[in-house]
Image: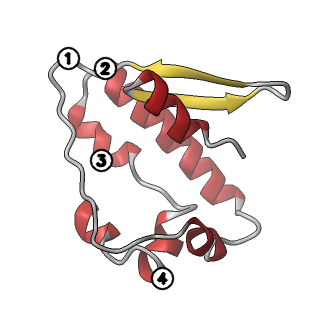
Amino acid sequence: EGHPDNVSPAIYGGIQLGIHTGERWMSERVTVPAGMQVVVFIPDTIGKTSDARAVLADTVTREAAVFNVGRVAWLVNAFNMQRFDNLKFGAQDKLHQPQRSDKVYPHLYPLIQ
């Protein structure tokens, strides 16, 4: 898979978007407002990638896909426009969070809320 969402921030810093063109991986930095700080939560448990992937469905509904595409666009725009009140909507997800929160990451929704 390559995990450009993990590799490119480690190399270039900041928030990165990554895609595969069919030939190579590409990444671009998302504009983050100056002075914005990040708070990191590191649980005292280990979430294995294999466990996190095992709870995901093999297919997704059109409704869930459209929801997530819209939320990603909203998230990037919230950073670009410095609309911090919109970040909470851009971070909503229907493809990973509901499936993983109960079985792999029980602390997820209390943190988001």
Q: How is the image coloured?
A: secondary structure
In front: mark 3 or mark 4?
4
Q: Amino acid at mark 1?
A: Ala
What amino acid does circle 3 point to? Lys
Give x and y (percent) for residue 71.
48, 43
Residue 48 to residue 65: above or below: below
- Near mark 1 (Cα within 10 A), the count class, few <14, some 14-19 or many ≥20, is few
Cα distance between the residues tagged 1 and 3: 19 Å
Q: Position of residue 25 (x, y in %)?
A: 71, 27
Tell me whether the residue at label 3 lies in contact with that at label 4, contact meaning CB atoms closer than 8 angstroms. Answer: no
Residue 18 visible in the displayed image: yes
Q: CA distance from mark 2 to mark 3?
A: 14 Å
Q: Secondary structure at mark 3?
A: helix
The residue that disc 4 covers is 103
* Residue annotated with mark 1: 34
Q: Amino acid at mark 4?
A: Lys
Element assignment for label 2: loop
**Mark 3: few, some, or many residues within 10 Å (few <14, many ≥20)?**
some
Q: Which quadrant holds residue 23?
A: top right
Q: Which mark is residue 23?
A: none
Q: Position of residue 111 (x, y in %)?
A: 24, 63
Q: CA distance from mark 3 to mark 4?
A: 23 Å
Q: Which residue is mark 3?
A: 88
Q: Nearer the viewer, residue 97 or 15?
A: 15
Mark number for residue 81?
Answer: 2
